[in-house]
Amino acid sequence: MIVVIDTNIIISALIKDSITRKILVQSNLHFKYPEVSLQEVFKYKAYIMEKTGYNEKTLEAIMNKLLEHINLVPLELIKPGLNASKEIMEEIDVNDAIFIATSLFLDKAVIWSDDADFERQKTVKILKTEDIIKMFKK
């Protein structure tokens, strides 16, 4: 199964060696993430380091480990569906349109997110962490 992950999933996996990190690293799911959204993760770098006590080198090592299991999708591939995705998300949270566009590019791949805003749209299937955990434990 192809799963587009949102930024909060990556941040969660960076902050704590939790089930989220284990799923990203150990499951047989195919994780995708819009490459352009990495800037959003880096925006929270100081917050993550403060919250975890990691130094920059440790945080970078964990991020690199995660990225071994996450395929980045270039913006050029997502761009054609971005306008339609912005229309889908304009009344909800237009900043999340990039994840909808990534999913549409990947033939409506599911999105893994605990952000309730995604549930307000009906174009792409959304899985919460609890849904992914159930799949992982099977």
Image (tube, helix red, strand yellow):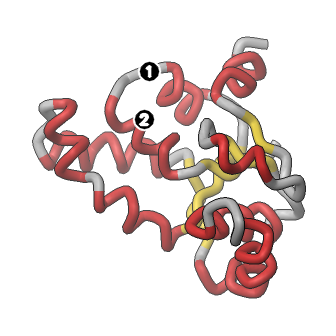
Seen in the image, is 103 located left or right of residue 113? right
3D distance between C-alphas at marks 2 and 1: 8 Å
Nearer the viewer's eye, disc 2 or disc 1? Answer: 2
Residue at the spot of label 2: 12
* Residue 1: % across, % down: 82, 42
Q: Is residue 71 left or right of residue 21?
A: right
Q: Residue at x 73, y 70 (%)?
A: 101
Q: Quadrant of residue 71?
A: bottom right
Q: Is residue 48 visible?
A: yes
Q: The residue tagged with tag 1: helix, strand or loop?
A: loop
Task: Please identify the quarter of the rendering in which residue 72 is found.
Answer: bottom right
Looking at the image, residue 133 lies above or below residue 86: above
Q: Quadrant of the C terminus?
A: top right
Residue 18's tag is: 1
Contact check, label 2 and label 1, Cβ < 8 Å: yes
Neighbor class of circle 1 (other Cα within 10 Å; few <14, some 14-19, many 20+) is few
What amino acid is found at the position of numbered circle 1 in the picture? Answer: Ser
Dot 2 falls on a residue whose secondary structure is helix
Are there few (<14), some (14-19), or many (20+) residues within 10 Å of tag 2? some
Q: Position of residue 20 (x, y in %)?
A: 52, 28
Q: How many marks?
A: 2
Q: Residue at x 38, y 68 (%)?
A: 39
| Residue at image point 68% right, 52% down | 4
The amino acid at mark 2 is Ser
The numbered mark at residue 128 is none
How far across and how far down the image is residue 34, in percent? 58, 66
Q: Earlier in the sequence, mark 2 or mark 1?
A: 2
Q: Quadrant of residue 33?
A: bottom right
Residue at (60, 42) in percent of width and height: 115
